[in-house]
Every structure is written in C-alpha cells, then in structure tokens.
Amino acid sequence: MNIKSEVGSRKSEGKALKQLSYFSFFPFLFSLGMAGAHAQSYPTKPIRIIVPLAPGGGNDTIARLIGQKIQGPLGQSIVIENRPGAGGLVGADVAAKSPADGYTLLLGNFAQMAIIPNVQPKMPYSPTRDFAPVSLIASAPLLVVVHPSMPVNSVKQLIALARSQPGKLNYASNGVGSTTHYATELFKMLTKTRMEHVPYKGLSLAMIDLVSGRVDLMFSSAVAMLPHVKEGKLRAIAMTGAKRSQAIQDVPTVAEAGVKDYEAGSWYGILVPAGTPRPIVDRLNKEIVATVKSKDLQDKLNEEAVIPIGSTPEEFSKHIEKELARAARVIKESGAKFD
C-alpha cells in the first residue's frame, strides 16, 4: 500500500466533506436570517383572525374586541373572518393549513381545541401539533337560562322538574360537540337527569327558539344571554364557573346550588399555524397581553361576565393539554354522543 497516497486521499475526502458541510450549513443560516428579517419587519400587511363560528356569539365578540385593540400597536388593520361549520372544525382546519407567517390567527376555544379532537375519529388537524399557542385571552363561564314560562327559579327546581319528567325537557346548544353541549351533558351526568338535546347551527338560531319558548333552557355564553335576561325575555338561574361573576353577582354558581364538583365553561385564545417564527409569536403575544391587561378592556370583559387572563405561549400550551385530558374523561364517563 502507498502510505502517502492513502493519506492524501483521506485529506481530500476530509476537505470535501468539510466543504459540503459548509455549503449545507449556509442555506440553514440564510433561512434563519430571512426568518429574522421577516419577523423584524412584521407586519407589513393586514392580519386576519379566523373565528370558526357564526357571527354574534361570544367568540365573535372577543375576536372583534381584541382585533380592534391590537391593530393600532401593530400598525395594520385586523380583519375578522367568520368560517363556521362542524362546530368550529372547518374554520380551525383553514387556520391550521394557512401559511405560518403570522398573517392568519385563530380565535380558538374549548370546543375546537379539546372537545372535537376527543370525538372525531379522523381529525383534519391536531390541536397540539398543528398550532403554536400565542396567548390564552380569557375564560368564560356559561349562564344557565330558562324561558320565563318555565316554573323554575333555581338549579334545585330545575333538577326536581327534570327528574319528575324524564326526557320531556329540552335544551338548546350551539351544535353537537360545542361547549354548550358539553356543559349541559356534564350537568345531566352529575345530577342524574334526562333532557333532550336540540342542537342548532350557531347561537343566533338557538337564541330565536329559546326566547320564543320553543326550547326550555340553555347553558350558553353570558355575553349573548345577559341582554335578554335584563329585558326579561330569559331567566338566569346559575353560572357554570367556579365562582360568581362580577357582572351578575346575585346569580349563584351551579356548584353553590348543590351540584358538587360542577364547573364548566369556555375559554378564548389566539393561536397561529405551527412553524410561525418565534419572534412573530412573541410580538403578537406582547400586544395581545398588553391589550388584555389594559383597564378599559378588563372592565369591558368583566361587564360581559368574561374573566381576562393574558397568558404566555407556554402557559397556553399547558392549558390546552390539560383541557384535552379533562374533556376526554367527561365524554367517556357521561356516555353522551358528541359526534
């Protein structure tokens, strides 16, 4: 064997590998640089917030409040795009498959991020893999309301009436698999009552039949229900949260009324498609949290029985994982059909 030849060959191979590694590394550095430059100039055009439900409900209200407040600091207009369908699955899927450039945001809630993933056998998106959480904006306990014609003024009276007439009372929901559906089924499970489910395609349609008396009751967004309660068109008997709302302090919680361990409600958060550069996520988080922490928005949310939060991306990520596990347990134990 020619030692010099062998050594020379190895040196040549080493040099070639070194050059190859440099050439492979440069595109990586270039992509990082481009992403950084893009993040520094962000945003340069209007941003859309996809609301995966019909206009008029709590999700729509929160999205418009946040969008209106953050467009000033971001220097770009915020467009609210309602994409209802399949309990929010359609809009969430559109958001998940959008470019990860910070120009498409999703107003996500408990249903799209925790309920639907637990009941849909073929999910078009993963709530944990296909989204990057930005901030948990607020939590929203639901208001339990009945039509004034009902001989019910409290949770105890509702339970007694439902037990005396199994299956005769009916309740409205925003749709199968919605937060309102989940909250009522949890109530039925813990109180051992039977009530018929009447699902609607959105809150607006449910509200028409609820106010007219075609359906008996509903567990739904306080934001949407309070005006009708104040006008005497509906009667509020309880809140579904862990504690009373500042907006309606005279209305007890379901747990206070005797249903031990009952707590349900929705929450609202902003997410972006997975892969969105972290500097863009941080910029959005900064503006959203500042908005949520502002006194005027906090006052506005409290008036609507919504509890402001304003979390970090990491806190929101842990919250989604926790909610996925909680929903899975309730859906399994209740035996209700959520699909």
Image (tube, rainbow, N blue to C red):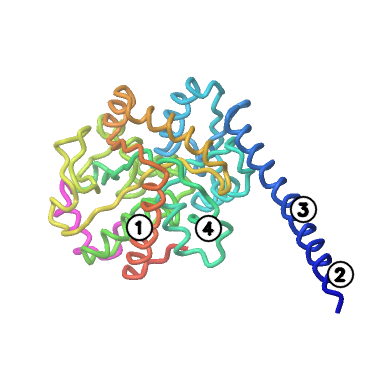
Residue indicated by mark 4: 126
Residue indicated by mark 2: 5
Residue located at (35% from left, 57% from top): 322
Task: Establish if 308 lies above or below 26.
Answer: above
Label 3: few (<14), some (14–19) or many (≥20) C-alpha neighbours in 10 Å = few
Q: Please give the label number shown on residue 19.
A: 3
| For the residues bearing labels 4 and 1, Cβ distance under 8 angstroms | no
Comes first in the chain, label 4 or label 2? 2
Q: CA distance from mark 4 to mark 3?
A: 40 Å
Label 2: few (<14), some (14–19) or many (≥20) C-alpha neighbours in 10 Å = few
Comes first in the chain, label 4 or label 3? 3
Q: Nearer the viewer, mark 1 or mark 2?
A: 2
Q: Nearer the viewer, mark 4 or mark 3?
A: 3
* Residue range corresponding to the magenta coloring: 152-169
Comes first in the chain, label 2 or label 3? 2
Q: Nearer the viewer, mark 2 or mark 3?
A: 2
| For the residues bearing labels 4 and 3, Cβ distance under 8 angstroms | no
Question: The disc labelled 2 sits on which kind of residue?
Answer: Ser
Task: Establish if 70 lies above or below 92.
Answer: above
Instruction: Give x and y (percent) for residue 107.
Output: 47, 41
For the residue pair 5 and 131, the one nearer the viewer reads as: 5
Question: The disc labelled 3 sits on which kind of residue?
Answer: Gln
Q: CA distance from mark 3 to mark 1?
A: 48 Å
